Image: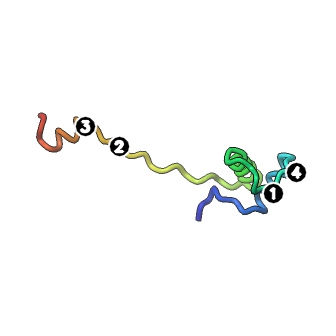
Amino acid sequence: MDRNALTADELRRAQRAMRLDAEPVESLTPLMRSTLAAVARCAMNRPAAPLPQPREIPNADAKRRAAGDIA
């Protein structure tokens, strides 16, 4: 389950909180939807989804060292 995904009802409640009732939920821009999602999470004390663990970026020298090309 995506914890950042909100139902249409939750988005409408956030719209009322931000006084954006006149705008249909379906016509909101992605930026506005994420803003509404943040407002809704805050209003419902619901945490955002955790960030993924960072992974090591491959380095050309590390690959060459692993292959035995350089010491």
Contact, mark 2 vs mark 1 (Cβ under 8 Å): no
Element type where label 3 sits in the image: helix
**Amino acid under disc 3:** Ala
Residue 33 position within the rendered picture, expressed as x and y whole percent measured from the top left: 71, 50
Secondary element type, mark 4: loop
Question: For the residues carrying marks 2 and 4, which lies nearer the camera in this image?
Answer: 4
Name the residue that disc number 1 marks.
Answer: 12
What residue would you read off at disc 3? 60
Side of 20 where 45 appears, left or right: left
> What's the residue at 15%, 44% (across, down)?
67
In this image, 68 relative to 51: left or right? left
Where's residue 39, x and y in %? 75, 48
- Give 46 or 39, whichever is nearer the viewer: 39
Locate residue 64: give its quadrant: top left
Rendered image quadrant of residue 7: bottom right
Residue drawn at 38 percent across, 46 percent down: 55
Q: Determine whether label 3 and label 2 are within 8 Å by CB.
A: no
> Where does the C terminus fall, quadrant-wise?
top left
The residue singled out by tag 4 in the image is 22
Label 4–label 3 contact, CB within 8 A: no
Residue identified by numbered label 2: 56
Q: CA distance from mark 2 to mark 4?
A: 46 Å
Is there a contact, CB below 8 Å, between mark 1 and mark 3? no
Label 3 neighbourhood size at 10 Å, few (<14), some (14-19), many (20+)? Answer: few
Report the amino acid beneath label 4: Ala
Give the amino acid type for the residue marked by disc 2 in the picture.
Answer: Glu
Crowd around label 2: few <14 · some 14–19 · many ≥20 (10 Å): few
Element at badge 1? helix
